[in-house]
Image (cartoon, rainbow, N blue to C red):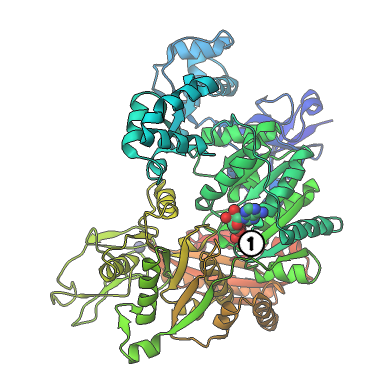
Amino acid sequence: MSFFLDVVLPLPLKETFTYVITPAEAEVLQPGMRVVVPFGKRKMYTAIVFKVHQAAPKAYQPKQIDSIIDSSSVISSVQLSFLAWIASYYQAPLGLVFRTALPSVMLLESETEIIIHEWERLLPTLSKNAIKLLQQVQPNSTVSLSQVQQLIGVKNPFPVLNELVESNYAVLKEEVYAQYRPKTQTEVVLHPRLKNDDALKQLLESLASKPKQHKTLLTFLQQKDTVVFSAFSKLETVSPSSLKTLIKQEVLVKQARVVDRLPAKTTPDNPLLPLSPPQEKAKTSIENHWKTKNITLLHGVTGSGKTEVYMQLIANQLRLGKQVLFLVPEISLTTQLMQRLFTFFGQQLVVYHSKYSPQERAETWGKINESRADAKLVLGARSAVLLPFQRLGLIIVDESHETSYKQYDAAPRYHARDAAMVLAHMHQAKVVLGTATPSVESYQHASTGKYGLVSLTERFQDAQMPEIHFVDLAEAYRKKQMKGHLAQSLAQAIEKTLLAKKQVLLFQNRRGYASFVECSQCAHVPQCPSCDVSLTYHQVSNELRCHYCGYMEQYAAACVACGTVSPQTHGLGTQQLEEEIQQLFPSASVARMDLDTTRKKHAHQKLISAFAQRQIDILIGTQMVTKGLDFEHVTLVGVLSVDNFLHFPDFRAHERAFQVLTQVAGRAGRLGDKSKVLIQTFLPSHPVLKFVQEYDYTSFFEQQIEQREQFAYPPFRRIIRIELRHKNMSSLIDAGNWLKHGLQERFSSVLGPVPPLVARQRNYYILHTLIKLPLDASQSAAKSRLSALLHSFAQVGAFKQVKVSVDVDPQ
Ligand code: ADP
Ligand code: ZN
């Protein structure tokens, strides 16, 4: 009798691949173990065991496996099923999903290159082969796995490689390039000799004659959290010169610490804050829903204190020994939240996101896989949903309406919110979706009883919601009441806010606001040579840039088309706005937060803390400033224009407009100060704006859901988008038509193909075709039909060069 083994190879293959194994191997191999297998011409890969069976593959003669790496499963059966679900639901190659989910050191292959570190001594635990290799290879040099094979004369170099990587003698080359430079901050601590109460008391007495130093030291001793030098030295009760003296005399000590890696927590976690009565009620009602439903939507207005509610729920799960996943849509949101979670759960908290180095991610992966006590609470962005949870009890999806939960640019194009619900189901864990502005889909599920629904309608401590007003731009222009791009009323409001020593947040929608150059004579607008967009003018560097492909050229004063000198710039970039505002308010400190100013690592975080510490009076920003930030002293939010949002040709455009305006408004008045939001628009009577003004989510939802039903959009249909890309327009159109006919034969509702807004990117023309699936149709059957059709598509000679990608539930 023959035995066969299905494995997942870390390659973009759709299916598992089959090998032949001996009965002895069949005996020991379990799903989730790793094996080394040959694949292709003389290449070796680490593969994950999926299934042992006895059905010989029909299409090919299976090869034998090379060796077995693990003695037990390194991937749980839940994790295996979850990754397989992602591959199948989002129509992504199974191997690619595994590659995305697993640390790269777990998936060595013969093409992998490693770099041997400088080393001083050989650990006594090293194997003979490891020693042999270390002695033959120059430190800091790169060797490929196949070279290792020859050097030490073994057939399978994987074990020795694993050993060297794990004991830190070597590193994978690809990981060196992903090097991550940690950010440090300077902190102040008490000198260890003063940790003793008597010594401290003596010192304080001796300082009686130096009141400034005395006061500074007292202030230091009163600080509850880590004392950051820069912020501390600015406190009112701190004298910078005394601080200097205290440091010189080694009473206080300055030290640098890496900040965005969590420090090991040495102090006990703080007890949680008591909940307000409405928060308490929300918490109890979530728990009640959980008796019958796994998922609950927490619809809480901005500033209602959802985080505090989450923390109570988290604490309960941790007490039960369960793991908790706290998902946030973007890393930039983690800074403030991380500090809050650290205070209360620092002993058990790990942070995980794709900007961390591969080593760090592998380390976290391992901790969670072992269900370690110091990694019970995981705070992470999208990819954290792929971690190997063992005893998952709860998933919090914060700001659950955010589209950044969906990966759109590369397969697997998964939605972390939706995948989280499936993962929770597999673990029989609970889910809370939290947001002030639920997606229409989520709210529909909550109002039809599929999810529990819990609302928090008041801000914490009854802080008032900001008053929202609209500024009619048409009228302001007509009456000549504009100061540049600001209506007089907005400018006056800013002035008043600055006088009251409060802060202003100005939001400018990025879409449609990029500034471009237009010749005043021939109206020529410089375009990107590879994309269908006009180039954006960057004043600081005097360059024209493409925001899609990064193309750059020096700005020329003479028009390339007609030669006229002094073309005009149009549109309003954040840069120009910043200048305008600075001129209008010369004594205010103005800063800007957009893609350009936050490209550098940590720039984003620096801006946020500078604003929080009131070093900035007016912060201008794009979408980035709308998201979940908690600033205490913002009492005015200005929105330059929303009209692009309202006009945007997408069935979710109004939903986005509602969300972004409600969220940006929610940044004001969080400490209870009376606050105001001014929104400039040419459409002051647009119905969506009315709903925003009245904080009337329910009516907004009812209007939206009716339209979704009428025009057959989600949640009444499922959408799959197929994207075709090709360098040649006419071949692309042929391919689009071929596909359209094929789709129309198989599906009842097919839209397109149509070019997207930017129809050519990086020299590729693009076409989108949508299929709408009714909810009752068997989804997996529909996906198989699609996948079979795309398979035949790929067989057509003329379409060989066409790139196809599938996006299930595009956002
Ligand atoms: P949301 O996420 O709902 O917008 P947050 O959770 O950020 O609101 O809470 C808003 C503010 O109120 C935060 O500064 C938070 O520290 C404070 N807050 C909320 N609940 C409590 C509580 N129970 N005790 C003390 N402070 C609270
Ligand atoms: Zn371009």
Say left or right for 527 vs 195: left
Disc 1 residue type? Gln
Q: Secondary structure at mark 1?
A: helix
Q: Is residue 706 above or below residue 166?
A: below
Where is residue 169? Give x, y as percent.
49, 19
Kindly tell me whether residue 784 is visible in this rendering. yes
Instruction: Give the quarter the ligand 2 occupies.
Output: bottom left
Give the camera-side residue of 775 and 211. Answer: 211
Which quadrant, please, contains the C terminus? bottom right
Q: Quadrant of residue 808?
A: bottom right
Query: Does residue 542 sit above or below 767 in this rendering?
Result: above
Image location of residue 779, percent across then percent down: 74, 64
Instruction: Kindly tell me whether residue 196 is visible in this rendering.
Output: no
Give the x, y percent position of residue 598: 39, 53
Looking at mark 1, is its residue's CB closer than 8 Å to ligand 1? yes
Q: Quadrant of residue 249?
A: top left
Q: Which residue is mark 1?
A: 461
Tell me the residue at 67%/48% (across/down). 273
